[in-house]
Image (spheres, rainbow, N blue to C red):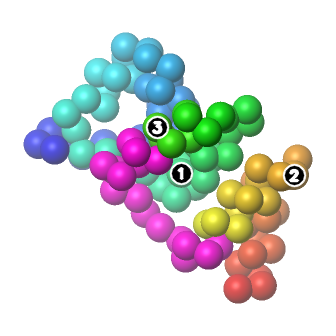
Amino acid sequence: MSGNRVLADTNTLIYFFNDHQKAINALDGNEIFISVVTEIELLSYPGLDDQSSQGIKEFLKDCAIVELYPKIKDLTISLKKSEESNFLTPLLLQLLNF
């Protein structure tokens, strides 16, 4: 990518994936950075089907992601998808048990 560096949050990416022109214009041609928290929120979004999940994963391959340990991230995604809990609760529990 040859544009500016852009830090995209979850809401911006949700708008982008729903074809909102302002979000598309903000991201188009730019180097996109996201936090691992945004990645977790996107991939555990309520009602996300397999096709959409796969599309998000493909998109994320072109983003720079500020990471946590992969094991903690994967466990947090699983817990968030399976329980109605505060986002930070499973993340903090996993950090304490890691």
Q: Is residue 19 above or below residue 96?
A: above
Q: Is residue 98 above or below residue 38?
A: below
58 part of magenta stretch: yes
Q: Residue at x 34, y 56 (%)?
A: 64
Please name which of the two marks, 3 or 2, marks the residue nearer to the observer.
3
Indicate the quadrant where residue 42 lies. top right
**Crowding at mark 2 (Cα within 10 Å: few <14, some 14-19, many 20+):** few
Mark 3: which amino acid? Gly
Tell me the CA gap for discs 3 and 2: 24 Å
| Circle 2 SS class | loop
Is residue 7 at all visible to an observer of this figure? no
Which part of the image, by quadrant, shows the N terminus? top left
In this image, 93 relative to 28: left or right?
A: right
Q: Residue at x 39, y 42 (%)?
A: 59
Q: Quick check: marks 3 and 1 in contact, CB under 8 Å? A: no
Tell me the CA gap for discs 2 and 1: 18 Å
